[in-house]
Image (tube, helix red, strand yellow):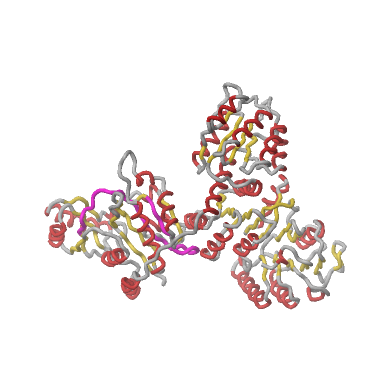
Amino acid sequence: MQKNFFNPQSIAVIGASRTPGKVGYDILKNILQYGYQGAVYPINPEAPEILGVKAYLSILDIPGEVGLAVVVVPPPKVGEVISQCGAKKIDSAIIITAGFGESGSEGTKLEDDLVRRAKESGMRFIGPNCLGVIDTHSRVNASFAAGMPATGSIGFFSQSGALCVAVLDRALAEDIGFSKFISMGNKADISDTDIMLALAEDDNTKVILGYIEGVKDGKQFMEVASQVSKKKPLIILKSGITSSGARAASSHTGALSGREASFDAAFKQSGVTRAHSFADLFNYALAFADQPLPQGPNIVIITNSGGPGILAADASDRSGLQLISLRKEIVDKLRTFLPSFASFYNPVDILGDASAERYEKALTTVLEDDKVNGVIVLLTPTAIVDVEATAKAVASIANSTDKPILTSFMGKKRVEPGAKILMKSHVPNYSYPEEAVSSLNAMYHYQLWINRPDKTYARVDDLKEKVSYIFEKVKGENRERLSESEVYEVLKTYGFSQPKSLFARTSEEAVAAAKGIGYPIAMKIISPQIIHKSDAGGIRLNLNSKKEVADAFFDITTRVKDIMPAATIYGVMIQEMVLGGKEVIIGITKDAQFGHTIMFGLGGIYVEVLKDISFRIAPLSHEDAIEMIKEIKTFPLLRGVRGEVGADIGAIKKSLLSFSQMTLDFPQIIEADINPLLVRKRGEGVIAVDARFTVGGE
């Protein structure tokens, strides 16, 4: 991005107004009143001067060069103004004006014209429909926000101007320093990825915050976010995550996936620290901006009250942090100055009558344990505690150690003076213990991200050609789903073991097939209209005789005809009963923004109820696949409990990677899943018991 967005030698406000309360007036006033040192040119054909500054009829009438144009004219005039800026050789513009793509079809036409004119002129612009841009270091406030934040190291970009205002208001109230504020508006030209790259290269920005409602190119977003997050913490709040795609999902994977799952997976794979609330966004920003990263998960909690200590301990147990057991010599040292009925372990409860000196000694002592990676200091405002003295003591220690110190001085009125001392000393203070734990946990996981080795990928190049004819045939016949036999061939080619299976069109053929496979057998209805066979009564298991098979054939076909009279029934599949193992599901669904998403979870008929699942964006690395497996809550069952042999985790990983490769080989796959994928004991592999594939679009 051009430097003129943040540090221009001169600024022209096109549409500057003489009327207080007008956006064109407020922007000009902000530029003039906060210390900007460059030339300022108001453009207004009806005013000789505004706020004591000479005004011009047109941008073309300005005698010198202009670095940045801020546009505040009515929507129909913006395109012409941009063309004039191009003629003036201005390379950067901030378009404040609303009434474009966000307002309907006519606005979209204006926005398209605006983009075309800017490209023809070689100009880049932020907006339209935005609040503006603030750079505290160059003293540029080219916005209509009410106020200028303190100079700091937090860079913030937002698709919502209103959220910018809210963030700015809190920053002003709490004296939190920012480097840049960027309201992006409609993102017609400059995108969030452009801003992320710019902030990553900005020497004045240490932490990058963002609020987004959507991304135009999911793959590009992940690529840029991965690059940026290796340099600086990238913390993003994403809204609008609860609605799934409009198309009805036919597979379990499709039913369970959606915008939430895709964005969550994308963030995990690209190192984005996800804020789930406005509070998280601020909490994480303060921690990352002001404290060193923890070098491990081991923390100590120091408190003057048992209750808050327990809350913090509970929050730690739910996170990736660990309450470390202090070394004996550290505990012995604590005993020398803490009351005998204090808690000398973790949390370290130094009791309600704790003085600032007791806090100081306890904090200094636990930091001597080289296994401690960070400390959370809690304080409740008892009648005895000197809040300000304690804050000064904690701040002094925090500024002399390379381990992160976070605090929660709980309450409001009595702790406020201490909280201000901590904030001025760059020690993050939180209203509640859980917030401090969550922030330190975010820092720990970011530390893992920046230190993780490069991902490794595997690919077998000769598989696609072996089954491409199947996908071509399905497309040629204008079908959406692969048949049972086609699914069998695809899975076989990509390395999946499957039960012995024979197709039967009649009761007699079913009995013969069962005899050929050997009892017990399973019977499944075969119909292109029936996706979830169990829901239609189209499955029978553990059939052990000729009579059971014949009866089951009649029952299945009759029941399905009653439930779905329009369904075409081709026959049944006779399949060997595979006994033992654990049922999991793996799946594919195609996301509009990020492409193919891979799912893994506990399988069987209850998958949509239990929803013990994980997602990642394809292509998967070896590391992605292992993380997916370990992420589900029931992973301990796969690992093995109470002495049982664990499931074949390696075979699950191989299956996920095979599904990932399918998405690269056949992008026309819209949905697919194997459910259940039966996982045998360690070293015995997996068996794909049932599967379905839906294709289209390519």
The percent position of residue 503, horizontal first and vertical second, equals 20, 63
Q: Which residues are magenta?
A: 574-601
x 63%, y 55%: residue: 208
Viewport quadrant of the C terminus? bottom left
The percent position of residue 345, horizontal first and vertical second, equals 54, 30
Q: Residue furthest top?
A: 340
Q: Main secondary structure of the magenta part?
A: strand
Q: Is residue 277 magenta?
A: no
Q: Is residue 634 left or right of residue 220?
A: left
Question: Is residue 639 shown above or below 230?
Answer: above
Q: Is residue 582 magenta?
A: yes
The percent position of residue 256, horizontal first and vertical second, equals 41, 54
The percent position of residue 209, horizontal first and vertical second, equals 62, 54
x 32%, y 51%: residue: 648
Q: Is residue 11 left or right of residue 310?
A: right
Viewport quadrant of the N terminus? bottom right
Q: Which quadrant of the structure image shows residue 656?
A: bottom left
